[in-house]
Image (tube, rainbow, N blue to C red):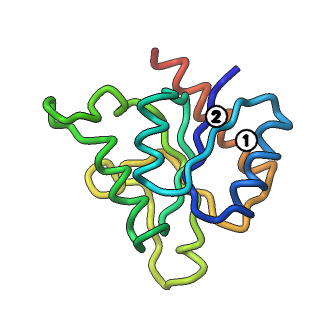
Amino acid sequence: MSKILIIDDDPDIVLAVRMCLEGEGYEVIEASSGSEGIEKIKSQKPDLIILDVMMETKTEGFQLALKLRSQDPTSEYIQYKNIPILMLTAIHSTTPLKFEPDIDYLPVEIFVDKPIDPDDLTGKVEWLLSQEKVSN
């Protein structure tokens, strides 16, 4: 059973994502901030991270993704750089900006817009987890 960490400060979103994923048999853990997320990553070693963009700051999710994907071999997060990240965000509906995964500036695999579509979310989670198994 794959372990998925949801890092989001909106309890309603966390509940909706949790219900969707647990219904598909995934083990779900949660964190409500980037700092709590880091602690859960270190202690729980998830197979996938679902990460919100805006939490305590408007870019907290972006900053966390950059930390986790640091190419610096001395980074304290280097051992987590291969955990797939699905970025869950409402930023596309609240700003005119359109973000896409970018290895240098936004190192995540996939964006999913809020509000979530359960089938879309589970399909992307399944795809990411299958990619992770192929690359190992």
- Residue found at the far right of this picture: 23
Q: Quadrant of the N terminus?
A: top right
Q: Residue at x 42, y 74 (%)?
A: 58
Residue 21: image tag = none
Identify residue type, mark 1: Gly
Give whichever of 112, 64 is nearer the camera: 64
Give whichever of 111, 74 is nearer the camera: 74
Corner quadrant of residue 126: top right
Q: Residue at x 47, y 46 (%)?
A: 37
Q: Position of residue 61 (x, y in %)?
A: 43, 59
Q: Is residue 115 above or below residue 74?
A: below
Q: Is the Cβ of the residue at disc 1 closer than 8 Å to that at disc 2?
A: yes
Q: Is residue 64 left or right of residue 84?
A: left
Corner quadrant of residue 57: bottom left
Q: Is residue 46 left or right of residue 77?
A: right
Disc 2, SS: helix
Neighbour class for label 1 at 10 Å: few (<14), some, many (≥20)?
Answer: few
Q: Is residue 128 left or right of residue 136?
A: right
Disc 1, SS: helix
Q: Position of residue 76 (x, y in %)?
A: 23, 34
Q: Residue at x 39, y 63 (%)?
A: 60
Q: Residue at x 69, y 55 (%)?
A: 14
**Disc 1 designates what residue?**
123
Q: Is residue 23 above or below residue 106?
A: above
Q: Position of residue 29 (x, y in %)?
A: 63, 38
**Disc 2 designates what residue?**
127
Q: How many marks?
A: 2
Neighbour class for label 2 at 10 Å: few (<14), some, many (≥20)?
Answer: few
Identify residue type, mark 2: Trp
Q: Is residue 136 left or right of residue 121?
A: left
